[in-house]
Image (cartoon, rainbow, N blue to C red):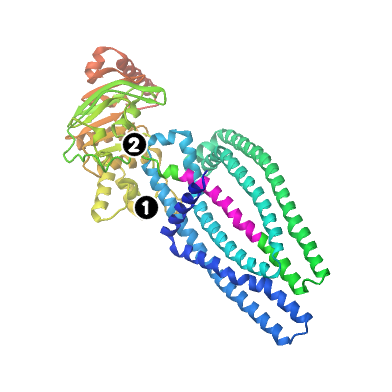
């Protein structure tokens, strides 16, 4: 990596810090330049005290030096305490909050395919893990760089005045130590990259054990033993990497320290002792030069190690920039595209094919729907039904064919505006640790009208009476993660709450993916009746395994292995006597057998 790239990357990160908390950079620079006073107390102070004592100078001279040293140290203490105990914690909070917020916003704008790209997802994981810490580290390295530079220049003046030859010893010592530091930094980054996939696996397993949705199965089934084994395997893999890294880094550290000790203790001390022995230096000079040479070498090493640190930071920042610079093909395309002002009156999926990587999921799919029509899409798991929905709402783009809304290619429409016209509930819907109202609106409750919308939606899905009895009503939190007053919902209640989302807005299209999988037959019947009523003048598309509900559809599409193999009304498909009829008869027979056994009531 070129020096220019290292410089630009670290400056890039400093701009982030400046954006979120300017005073942190200002105070860091001030603390760096205040270091010019430190050598006066650490080096020249002891020299003059020793020389004054050996030369029998008035004691008041010694007192004056001590007072100056004390004044410098107390001022440093006050400023350092304010900087490290007041400014730094606030800076950490502001910077971490700002950068993590930025990364979360970026995550929300990534195309869905990014989550299926292992390389990109690893980059994102590293960015999320490192970004805030790396921002703070860049400031720390910049502060230490300037502090060491100012400190070293001050010491340079002291040493040149007393004995210039000592500079050569200090510089050689520093260069050798920095060389080992540079090699060590490269090794460190290499091993961090090797650890990323194992640490990601560990974090996933830890998450499983503290998230509520996994709690029942972990206690009932032996899955925990499998997870424990996987956890231990990843710990062993990390240990193997750390073992290899540890040997190399330990050896580099020992070699670096040994070289430094030989130069700064052995060579320096013998040289200065020889000077005193021959009467060239005073005892005070010896003390000042020995302290100055060790600190000069140390500060120079920190100064040059800063370049190593900046190089290491740059490697991580490059990773972060690749994530931040990623240009979404779908999610960021809204601003430059047409906004569909009119209501959606028809949708057409024309000869659409789509593949995940190289595996084709949909092949030449053609489906049409107009205002007021109810479309059912049926088929076995993995047939491609949900993928088709993801294409309609542009979570993915088709590989072949086109999807038209009001005869306009959806790729030419603002994706955000298009989605705002579609009410959608996925099969794998999510509820959040937020209030009932926020889970229905999926945004902040701002007005009394918002509350009215929530209550109306809850009536439509049959949750009104239950929520009405709660002390905090629609402001009750889902789960008890943040409050003991929160509630847990059953599977059916959770699905009803998710379904309530389609009633809060006058959507042009309503899409439901397995909307009744957790509902009992009566709740399912009521849900479909309500949906048919609210979508009278809309396009309704629902995916379902329960074919008893498809009798209400105007048209049914049976998808098998990514192809539409049958289409028509329920009556037409039953008369066709094909796969749809076999699936319908099999389900009907199942329910009849349950009823005869007393296990179900039709």
Q: Which residues are magenta?
A: 298-320
Q: Quadrant of residue 388?
A: top left
* x and y percentages locating residue 91 in the rendered image: 48, 61
State the residue at coordinates (41%, 22%). 359
In this orientation, which residue lies closer to the viewer: 319 or 306? 306
Assign a secondary structure to mark 1.
loop
Above or below, 311 against 110 in this view is below
Q: Which residue is mark 1?
A: 476
Q: Which residue is mark 2?
A: 329
Does residue 380 appear to the left or right of 214 in the view shown? left
Q: Is residue 504 visible?
A: yes
Spatial separation of the CA atoms under disc 1 and disc 2: 39 Å
In this orientation, which residue lies closer to the viewer: 397 or 588? 397
Does residue 573 appear to the left or right of 495 in the view shown? left
Assign a secondary structure to mark 2.
loop
Does residue 318 appear to the left or right of 429 in the view shown? right
State the residue at coordinates (73%, 52%). 259
Above or below, 391 against 504 in this view is above
Sequence-first tag of 1 and 2: 2
Magenta highlight: main SS: helix
**Is residue 300 rendered magenta in the image?**
yes
In this orientation, which residue lies closer to the viewer: 441 or 121? 121
Q: Quadrant of residue 230?
A: top right
**Is residue 526 rendered magenta in the image?**
no
Q: Nearer the viewer, mark 1 or mark 2?
A: 2
Q: Does the residue at mark 1 contact the one at mark 2 (Cβ under 8 Å)?
A: no
State the residue at coordinates (21%, 27%). 369
* x and y percentages locating residue 355 in the rendered image: 37, 25
């Amino acid at each position: 990596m070129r020096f220019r790239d290292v410089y630009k990357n670290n400056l890039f990160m400093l701009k982030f810090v400046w954006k979120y908390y300017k005073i942190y950079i200002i105070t860091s620079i001030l603390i760096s330049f205040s270091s010019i006073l430190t050598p006066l107390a650490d080096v020249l102070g002891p020299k003059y005290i020793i020389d004054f004592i050996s030369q029998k100078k008035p004691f008041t001279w010694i007192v004056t030096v001590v007072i100056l040293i004390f004044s410098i140290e107390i001022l440093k203490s006050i400023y350092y305490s304010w900087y490290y105990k007041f400014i730094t914690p606030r800076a950490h909070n502001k910077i971490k909050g700002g950068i993590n917020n930025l990364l979360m916003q970026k995550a929300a704008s990534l195309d869905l395919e990014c989550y299926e790209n292992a390389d990109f997802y690893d980059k994102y994981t590293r960015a999320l893990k490192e970004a805030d810490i790396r921002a703070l580290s860049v400031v720390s390295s910049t502060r230490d760089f300037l502090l060491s530079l100012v400190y070293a220049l001050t010491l340079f003046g002291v040493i040149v005045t007393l004995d210039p030859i000592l500079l050569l010893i200090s510089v050689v010592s520093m260069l050798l130590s920095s060389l080992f530091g540079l090699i060590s930094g490269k090794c460190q980054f290499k091993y961090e990259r090797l650890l990323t996939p194992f640490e990601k696996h560990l974090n996933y397993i830890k998450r499983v054990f503290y998230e509520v949705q996994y709690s029942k199965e972990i206690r009932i089934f032996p899955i925990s033993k499998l997870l424990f084994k996987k956890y231990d395997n990843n710990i062993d893999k990390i240990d193997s990497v750390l073992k290899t890294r540890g040997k190399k880094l330990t050896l580099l550290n020992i070699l670096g320290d040994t070289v430094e000790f030989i130069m700064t203790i052995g060579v320096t001390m013998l040289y200065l002792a020889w000077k005193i022995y021959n009467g060239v230096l005073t005892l005070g000079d010896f003390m000042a030069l020995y302290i100055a040479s060790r600190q000069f070498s140390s500060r120079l090493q920190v100064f040059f190690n800063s370049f190593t640190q900046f190089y290491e930071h740059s490697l991580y920042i490059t990773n972060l920039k690749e994530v931040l610079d990623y240009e979404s093909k779908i999610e960021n395309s809204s601003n430059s595209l047409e906004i569909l002002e009119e209501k959606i009156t028809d949708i057409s999926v024309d000869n659409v094919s789509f593949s995940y990587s190289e595996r084709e999921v949909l092949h030449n799919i053609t489906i049409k729907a107009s205002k007021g029509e109810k479309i059912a899409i049926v088929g076995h798991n993995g047939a491609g039904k949900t993928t088709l929905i993801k294409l309609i709402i542009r979570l993915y783009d088709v590989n072949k064919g086109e999807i038209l809304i009001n005869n306009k290619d959806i790729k030419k429409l603002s994706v955000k505006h298009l989605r705002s016209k579609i009410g959608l509930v996925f099969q794998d819907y999510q509820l959040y640790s937020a209030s009932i109202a926020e889970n229905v609106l999926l945004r902040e409750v701002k007005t009394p009208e918002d509350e009215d919308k929530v209550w109306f939606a809850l009536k439509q899905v049959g949750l009104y009476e239950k929520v009405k009895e709660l002390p905090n009503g629609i402001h009750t939190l889902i789960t008890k993660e943040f409050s003991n007053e929160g509630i847990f919902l059953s599977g059916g209640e959770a699905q009803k709450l998710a379904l309530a989302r389609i009633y809060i807005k006058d959507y042009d299209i309503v899409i439901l993916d397995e909307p009744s999988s957790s509902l009992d037959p009566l709740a399912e019947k009521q849900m479909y009746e309500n949906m048919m009523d609210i979508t009278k003048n809309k396009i309704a598309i629902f995916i379902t395994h329960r074919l008893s509900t498809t009798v209400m559809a105007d048209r049914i599409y049976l998808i098998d292995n990514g192809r539409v193999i049958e289409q028509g009304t329920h009556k037409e498909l039953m008369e066709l006597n094909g796969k749809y009829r076999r699936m319908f008869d099999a389900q009907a027979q199942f329910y009849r057998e349950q009823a005869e056994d007393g296990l179900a009531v039709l």
